[in-house]
Image (cartoon, rainbow, N blue to C red):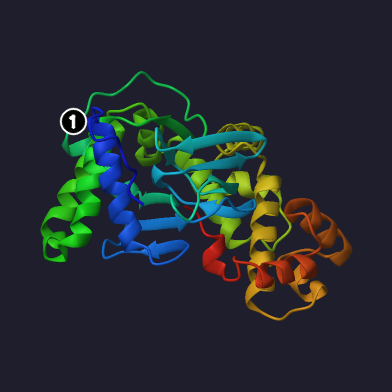
Amino acid sequence: MNPSFEANAPVSRLERDRAELAAIIDRSTAGNGVHATALPALSLFRAEAPGAQVCAMYEPGLALVAQGAKQLLLGDEVLHYDQANYLVTSIDLPVVSQVTRASAREPYLCAMLRFDAQAIGELLTGAALPCPPATAAGRGMAVSPLTPELLDTVLRLVRLLDTPRDIPVLAPLIERELLYRLLTGEQGARLRHVAMSGSQSQQIARAIDWLKGHYQRPLRIDELAATVNMSASSLHHHFRAITAMSPLQYQKQLRLQEARRVLLTERCDVATVAHRVGYESPSQFSREYSRQFGAPPLRDAEQWRRGAGTTPEALRAG
């Protein structure tokens, strides 16, 4: 819902643009959850009440809140973001997310844009952007204060939803400008690591891709390190620095999130699900599932079916 302002109160550029962005997202989202758009990289998220903690996989991208607030748990770290901040994710990360401020009158409204590493690399090369001082990759997720320039760029991109005939020509230009704003902003160094050949971020991204494709298998660190051309100690160090967890913890998150998806979409017994996601012991699976989601597998799935979040879409990021 479009926030209201006193008739005589001065309205800043940020407030005006944020109100317009909220209005567009509001009328473009018919219900709670994630909504795809005519722009392949852009999706919109809506929630009309604070929610329970939800495990989700955040892909590389930008999340910009037009209204409301959200909290993320990455490993043991807590990140808060709202309409005064934007969130950048530079690598696939499993998180626990929770909408913390929303109502039917003023729902949580968020625009999300997925990043293309190739487009980032092309912009870095073609635009000859100045290189910042050499730094470590740092966390693969961070929050920064929202600037008028970044909000204006996102708003112009979202406005295209009202004029779809303009999307083929204007969307690529605005998306390129958006990457430029991010690369020259506070999160620029973080994004550069995504596109730098041989960087620690790229090596860890390759390790994550391997884990996502082989999460059912027992994890052998030496094998994973050799796959991404790192030593085992270096893999451990940089993996934790970027993801806030060890490779084994990351694999466990992948297994448990996939197990929850299966339980919500298929009628399977616990032992079947446990073995399907890589657990040899159903009892160990149940213990770890309960610690992660706050209830045993079958009870958790039944609670989700009875509640608002009954579909896999309800578990997606926003």
- For this view, does 212 lie left or right of residue 65? right
Q: Tell me the residue at 27%/33% (across/down).
A: 14
Please identify the residue farthest to the bottom as the structure is shown.
Answer: 267
Sort mark 1 into few (<14), some (14-19) or many (20+) by Cα contacts within 10 Å.
Answer: few
> Which of the two residues, 20 or 162, is positioned nearer the viewer here?
20
> Which of the two residues, 136 or 155, is positioned nearer the viewer here?
155
Indicate the quadrant where residue 268 lies: bottom right
Q: Tell me the residue at 74%/52% (across/down).
A: 292
Please identify the residue farthest to the top as the structure is shown.
Answer: 133
Q: Tell me the residue at 18%/54% (across/down).
A: 171
- For this view, does 128 lie left or right of residue 67? left
Under circle 1, the secondary element is: loop
Q: Which residue is mark 1?
A: 128
Q: Is residue 268 above or below residue 104?
A: below
- For this view, does 307 lie left or right of residue 48? right
Callout 1 amino acid: Ala
Q: Tell me the residue at 79%/68% (across/down).
A: 299
Residue 162 screen position, x and y as percent: 19, 61
Indicate the quadrant where residue 147 lies: top left
Q: Is residue 249 above or below residue 257?
A: above
Residue 102 screen position, x and y as percent: 50, 48
Q: Is residue 179 visible?
A: no
Q: Is residue 84 above or below residue 276?
A: above
